[in-house]
Amino acid sequence: MSQPPTKALGAERKTWDKAAFEQRARERVERELEEEREAAKAKAPPRVVVQRAPLDRDKARADQNLDLHGAVGKKKVINSKTPELARSPFYCTVCNCQLRDSATWLSHLNGKNHVRNLGMNLRAERSTLEGVKAKLEATTAKRREDLTPDEAAAAFRAEFDERVRQQEEQARLDRQQRRDAERAQKRAQPAADGAHVRDEPEAEPVDPMMAAMGFGFAGFGSSKQPR
């Protein structure tokens, strides 16, 4: 009589605990959501828009030494005790940095970082006619303050002569324009004006035979001269 077959070790059908795996999945999702919330809280706050004044070149260079050629051909010995301000030809007190040559110095003064540290932006203010006139008047007044009395008198005479010359030139141009307009008006007169001119009678042609016989039109008139 045959014996019943024996089961192989570990050959049973594997079963899964669905409830346990569902719990693990829910915990993983909750953990990921919590990590996302923590990461969102840790982000930097939104940047505040800083309103800076328009660019003013005079203010940007007011406290800076623009002596570009003062150190040309000179030598300087520096050591660890030399002050930081004296270690390079150019030093920016606004940005606290050293610059080695004039090209770098000018590039720095016109750069974005320097202008930003001054509280301005690179967007220049739109110029107006009144602003330009005021700027020119201020510049002229400042130049006059630096002149001696003789130089100021000479500058006044030169300015007066220039204004007189400009007025004379403008008057000459106005006269020339008026003359040109009058000439154009005369040339543009209508052709009907010519109808008032009396037409001269045309001379009748003379027959050659009669002219040879002495019977021209000039012969019919009296030959006597008026007394």
Image (cartoon, rainbow, N blue to C red):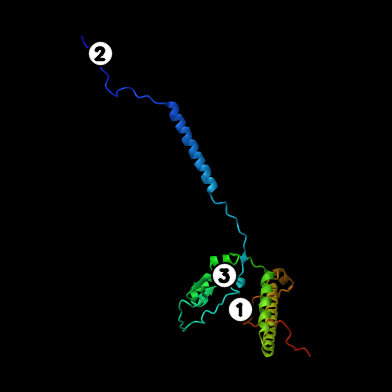
Q: Residue 4 — which label?
A: 2
Q: Nearer the viewer, mark 2 or mark 1?
A: 2
On the image, numbered disc 1 is attached to which residue?
208
* Residue nearest the observer in this picture, 188 or 12: 12
Q: Are marks 1 and 3 in contact (CB under 8 Å)?
A: no
Q: Name the residue: 57% across, 54% down.
A: 47
Which corner quadrant of the image does residue 22 belong to?
Answer: top left
Q: Nearer the viewer, mark 2 or mark 3?
A: 2
Q: CA distance from mark 2 to mark 1?
A: 168 Å
The extreme right residue here reads: 227
Q: CA distance from mark 1 to mark 3?
A: 113 Å
Q: Earlier in the sequence, mark 2 or mark 3?
A: 2
Q: Earlier in the sequence, mark 1 or mark 3?
A: 3
- 190 w.r.t. 86: above or below: above
- Horizontal side of residue 91 vs 15, given as left or right: right
Residue 85 position, x and y percent, is 52, 76
- Tell me which amino acid carries mark 2: Pro
Res. 216 in view: no
Quadrant of the image containing the N terminus? top left
* Label 2: element kind: loop
* Residue nearest the observer in this picture, 74 or 225: 74
Residue 92 position, x and y percent, is 54, 72
* Label 1: element kind: helix
The extreme top residue here reads: 1
Q: Residue 94 — which label?
A: 3
Q: Earlier in the sequence, mark 2 or mark 1?
A: 2
